[in-house]
């Protein structure tokens, strides 16, 4: 089964909807990755701010990071080979990369869909001001309470999965007699961008 790995630059969240301003490119890319999953493609994302050790584990990604200090992120890896760097590919490009047939094109992100995505992301990020802001916009757009509840449910599921993963990491690192030494988040010490990745947002 083809796998897609996305190595994102350091940021709070990969949805593009964290905060009052939505990043349409990131939101569209997140939607395209979800579409890939429905086609049976395994997708994983790594955030430089939160999982820097993953960037060191892949030789191709580490080489790019050493060379540019993060300026060439994101890096898209298909299977085990670097496919693109420095930009987020469109859905039709992703489909071609993994060997899928022609697609009907990217889904149009209406304002209503964006606000539902933003509500779910606010829950996942535990951002109270974000939720209030997008809740008010959703109400003005006439979105139903049922639709907003569904968005909240999805955001909560993502949040719980993330919490489970970090607890699992802690248990793995603390499971032995001696705590494991964490992999340095600084793959290229000479680059300030990478060094700053030690701090979580």
Image: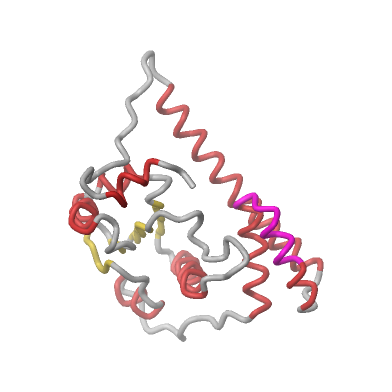
Is residue 1 visible to the viewer in this orientation of the structure? Answer: no
In the image, residue 78 sits, relative to residue 165, either above or below, namely below
The image shows a total of numbered marks equal to 0
> Quick check: 68 left or right of 197?
left
Dominant secondary structure of the residues highlighted in magenta in the image? helix
Q: Is residue 128 magenta?
A: yes
The colour style of the image is secondary structure
Task: Place residue 114 in its image quadrant.
Answer: bottom right
Residue 75 location in percent, x, y? 30, 62
Of 168 and 136, the residue lying toward us:
136
Task: Place residue 69 in its image quadrant.
Answer: bottom left
Segment tinted magenta in the rendering: 125-135
Residue pictured at 40% horizontal, 54% vertical: 10
Residue 7 location in percent, x, y? 35, 57
Is residue 140 visible to the viewer in this orientation of the structure? Answer: yes
Residue pictured at 61% horizontal, 52% vertical: 124
Residue pictured at 45% horizontal, 56% vertical: 11
């Amino acid at each position: 089964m083809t796998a897609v790995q996305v190595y994102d630059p350091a940021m709070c969240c990969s949805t593009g909807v964290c905060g009052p301003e939505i990043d349409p490119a990131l939101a569209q890319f997140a939607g395209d990755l979800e579409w890939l999953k429905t086609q049976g493609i395994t997708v994983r994302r790594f955030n430089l701010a939160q999982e820097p050790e993953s960037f060191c584990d892949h030789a191709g990604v580490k080489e790019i990071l050493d060379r540019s200090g993060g300026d060439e992120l994101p890096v898209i890896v298909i299977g085990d080979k670097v496919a693109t760097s420095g930009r987020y590919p469109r859905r039709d490009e992703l489909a071609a990369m993994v060997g899928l047939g022609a697609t009907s094109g990217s889904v149009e992100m209406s304002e209503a869909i964006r606000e539902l995505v933003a509500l779910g992301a606010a829950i996942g990020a535990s951002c109270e001001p974000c939720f209030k802001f997008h809740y008010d916009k959703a109400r003005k757009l006439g979105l139903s309470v049922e639709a907003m509840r569904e968005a909240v449910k999805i955001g909560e599921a993502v949040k719980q999965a993330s919490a489970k993963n970090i607890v699992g990491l802690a248990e793995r690192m603390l499971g032995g007699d001696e705590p494991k030494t964490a992999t340095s988040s600084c793959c290229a010490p000479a680059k300030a961008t990478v060094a700053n990745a030690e701090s979580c947002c």
